[in-house]
Image: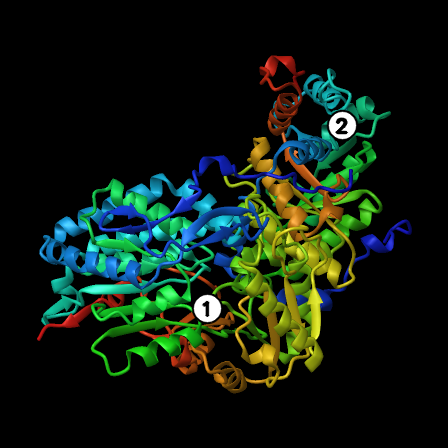
Amino acid sequence: MSSKTSLKNSVIDWSSTIDMIDNVRIDELGVKERTSSLATRSIKRDSKLEGLKKIVSMCDLTTLEGEDTEGKIAQMSSKAMTPDPSDADVPNAAAVCVYPSLVSTAKNIVRDSNVKVASVSSYFPSGQAPLESKIVDTQFAINEGADEIDIVINRKAFFEGDFRKVYDEIVSLKEICGDIHLKTILEVGELETYENIKKASLIALSAGSDFIKTSTGKISSGASREACLVMARAVREFADSGYGVKGIKVAGGIRDSKDAIRYLVIINEELGVEWLTPEYFRFGASSLLDDVLKQIKKLKTNSYQSSYYFPRG
Amino acid sequence: MNNWEYSESIESEKIVNIEKKYGNFIDGKFVTPKSKQYIDTISPSTEKILSSISIGNQQDVDYAVASAKEGLKKWSKTNPSERAKYLFKLARLIQERSREFAVLESLDGGKPIKESRDFDLPQVAQNFFYYAGWADKLDIAWGNEQYKPYGVVGQIIPWNFPLLMLSWKVAPALATGNTVVLKPAETTPLTALLFAELCEEVGLPDGVFNLVTGDGSTGSHLVNHKDIKKIAFTGSTGVGKYIQKSLAGKDVGLTLELGGKAANIVYSDAALDEAVEGVVNGIFFNQGHVCCAGSRLLVQEDIEEKFIKKLEKRMQTLNVGNPLDKNTDVGAINSKDQLDKIEKLVNEGVADGGDLFQIECELPKNGFWFKPSLFTSVQANYKIATEEIFGPVLTTLTFRTPEEAVEIANNTEYGLSAGIWTEKGSKILWTADRLEAGVIWANTFNKFDPASPFGGYKESGFGREGGRHGLLSYLKVSS
């Protein structure tokens, strides 16, 4: 393990992990009820503006397509640094999220800003490759200058009941990441049940992930508020056990401000306001940012602007 | 940037129109009370006077009962499908004006707008829809026996769910062909008065629904009136006993829905995070002014520490304050009297040796407020473990085995409701079989459905409201 690894990133041993997984009990209706009750929070005026600015600062602006080019990445990276050039009050996005081959392009543009470059790896989105390949994939992204790595869990192993393999793979990848932030994607749309989501969350956290992330955005069923709630409770349990404070990234299908604010409410009430920073909560999104920028303008000027007033990303 | 307080989001008071002074609703119209005595109804969250209502005296009650008796002649002969039409109309009108009703309920009673909007009002409309459906199907409700309505029914309702309790009583009574004299609680009469306006609007025949406002003296006149054939009461066990004594030996029907001290049993194999939510909902819903509130937390000893820690953390996130703020979770205590009662019992609990946890929050200067509270280290003989507090106060007891849980749960004079939390289905059934309570929830709490009967065991009362069984509270076997 890298000598730079801090306590925060330390791996929790397998037997403690198994203890946590064995105790996973979730009532599905209870999760749904709590989620829909939190969705009735009425976020207005100052708290809305504050929330929207937080969302911008938590955005991992993402493009993960075969058609991505250096030009496209340059555009998006530039937007991440200055999402709304007409309003200095609007913060920069947290990161741009790209494929490994485009990391250096992004890094060259955001180098002098606060914007981080995140790269997916480990044979995103399926993860159907041997660990050796995943390590090469990840090492390449790191060498290209990635600040953060988004990997996928081995769902094949998970569904075959080989939890240990899921854990071991993440441990190996975290080892080469060292201090580089590791976000582990559970693909909640495939895991389906809340118990699976919680078990996968605890495995990923124990194995040293800095973040757990809902989805790849590559299957039809992306993030859900219920999944976010379950993951938040896993993060809370992990922190309460003295194992460290970890983050959550929700991604896949979050397109408007209203929805995004509801995610903030879940984190705020289930984990606490300490988690409402880019260090511990992120949105993976492509179209969300524009809607948030429009809403911020609307709150400030009382008029709703067309998309062409905001730079393309 | 590291804080995120929700800005106020206040539901407008301006959408309701409150008269300065109200009379009674008798014989299809609002009439000046004969008593000429009035009392103010205030908002418990601000202590602002909202309106003046009359304290009905013997003459007012006589007038209302006479009107109901007259109304009965026509109503009992009205075709059942016609009766249903009126109830359907009322249900739809309640839905249409539900925002108004919700604001009024929160203003007058102190409950959070999110509860009056999302719980009380939808339930009220559903009750009217549900019993409207039964009105022309009474012949198939209970087999071949012939049933007939009691006649003039006196109904006395409490202040915790004013309009909902009205719907629980008025809808089945009218569906079965009775006529009604209703007395709402003196602290929360406004939604019943607005309901009377709706009765006028739908053209409900004169005398079918009558409303006399007032206090305990008014209720007493109603209970003791010679032409009343049935009394339905929801309220405290003390008053319930008084009513039962008053009616002893008379040919008057009676159903009582009284107090409770429900056990919420959390086994160590429960889904704990969801159980925490259920326990919070069970006791802090409507400031704990709920007869079926889960006011005794029975937690298995091996998870007590963990569970209490989770519970305290969750309680700390409750927003206490202005009932009209859409983000308020816990509103105002209904009255000064009730607040005094809660304070007294909590002080006794501390004196007895209970450990009191209260959340940190700022309470408004005016109005009646009590911080959500949790007692631990409580023994079964403490008053807080046996008496109904009827406020946002949860009392914790522990148990070792399922047998012991059931024993403690049943060790009370009440028997209205109970909750069971475990992921093991067989344990739910085993426990539910042995609990003496009218309603038992498993892995949830405070769930209501008009089709499901509600009522108590032991000193929590008798008779059922809701469902097919609820019809029997307003029907008797034909001679």
Expressed as whole percent of the image width and height from the top left, the position of residue B425 reads 45, 72
Label 1 and label 2 in one chain: no
Expressed as whole percent of the image width and height from the top left, the position of residue A187 reads 58, 46
Instruction: Name the amino acid, label 2.
Output: Pro
Q: CA distance from mark 1 to mark 2?
A: 50 Å
Label 2 environment density (alpha carbons within 10 Å; few <14, some 14–19, many ≥20): some
Label 1 environment density (alpha carbons within 10 Å; few <14, some 14–19, many ≥20): many
Residue at 33% in and 48% down: B195
Q: For residue B184, which numbered disc appears in the image?
A: none
Image height check: is A79 above or below A249? above
Q: Is residue B186 left or right of residue A163?
A: left
Residue underneath mark 1: B292
Chain to which mark 2 belongs: A
Q: Is residue B284 left or right of residue B360?
A: left
Its colouring scheme is rainbow
Residue underneath mark 2: A91
